[in-house]
Image (cartoon, rainbow, N blue to C red):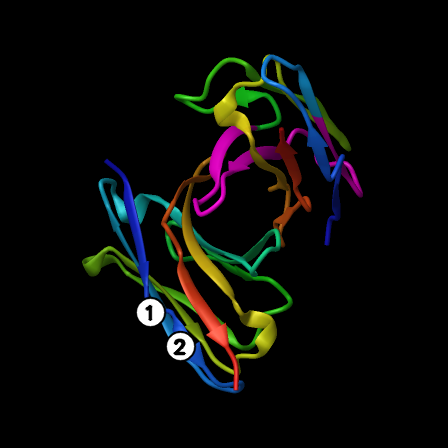
Amino acid sequence: AIQMTQSPSSLSASVGDRVTITCRASQGIRNDVDWYQQKPGEAPKLLIYAASTLQSGVPSRFSGSGSGTDFTLTISSLQPEDFATYYCLQDYNYPFTFGPGTKVDI
Amino acid sequence: QVHLVESGGGMVPPGGSLRLSCVASGFIFSDYGMHWVRQAPGRGLEWVTFLRYDGSTIHYADSVKGRFTISRDISKNTLYLQMNGLTTEDTALYYCARQFGRLTFDSWGQGTQVTVSS
């Protein structure tokens, strides 16, 4: 199975900060990575698919990049509602695998 | 509006069985692949199983293979997860989520809690 690692595992930031989360795959996976946001007590929410495509309705301050093995989620200007845990997912092949998550807090 | 509503969770002893359901509405159920994803308490997300939109392909995580079975009833717009031989490692919140083409998990239910304990 493809392993997905994420860094950092947690970070503290302030409103207005630029935040970058990275995800690395154990093998090349083209651009088959998605990013999800999960707030406490809620189901995850799709933010980015195919590494860089913004899901409908997601604010443009979120962006994704990368291909092959290295991927990045960037929040250009952190807002209060963005404090959450972020997961990457590889859907290149089965079994789909998530990264361990990055918790973004104040 | 898309809705996915899971049910069927509960507390069972090790070795027990449960059948989870996920009722879909607001979209053409037979046009979408469907997944189950779980999250153990305080832990990350784990993909469990997938059923292709046309029913032709099923995949399972190694951790559940041979114990869990995914199925659906199109006439009822319902996805199922039959879980047998449950262990404490299966304790988690179980979500159903849909797939359409390149869009993976674009909609999720609210989850149903499964607790395996003696």
SS class of the residue under badge 2? Answer: strand
Magenta part of the protein: which range?
A21-49
Decide: few, some or many residues near mark 1? Use Cα within 10 Å; few <14, some 14-19, many ≥20: some
Residue at image point 40% right, 55% down: B111
Q: Observer-nearest residue: B88 or B26?
A: B88
Residue at image point 39% right, 57% down: B55
Indicate the quadrant where residue A71 lies: top right
- Same subunit under labels 1 and 2? yes
Residue at image point 53% right, 69% down: B91
The x, y position of residue B115, in whole percent, is 48, 73
Q: Of the two numbered discs 1 and 2 on the same chain, state the one appearing first in sequence.
A: 1
Decide: few, some or many residues near mark 2? Use Cα within 10 Å; few <14, some 14-19, many ≥20: some
SS class of the residue under badge 1? Answer: loop
Where is the N terminus of chain B found, in terms of image quarters? top left
Determine which residue is flagged by label 1: B8
Amino acid type shown at disc 2: Leu
Q: Residue furthest right?
A: A26
Determine which residue is flagged by label 2: B18
Q: Are marks 1 and 2 in contact (CB under 8 Å)?
A: yes
Query: What chain does badge 2 belong to?
Result: B
Residue A45 lies in the magenta stretch: yes
Question: On the rendered structure, is A98 left or right of B110?
Answer: right
Query: What chain does badge 1 belong to?
Result: B
- Residue B105 in the image: above or below residue A54: below
Amino acid type shown at disc 1: Gly
Q: Is residue B103 visible?
A: no
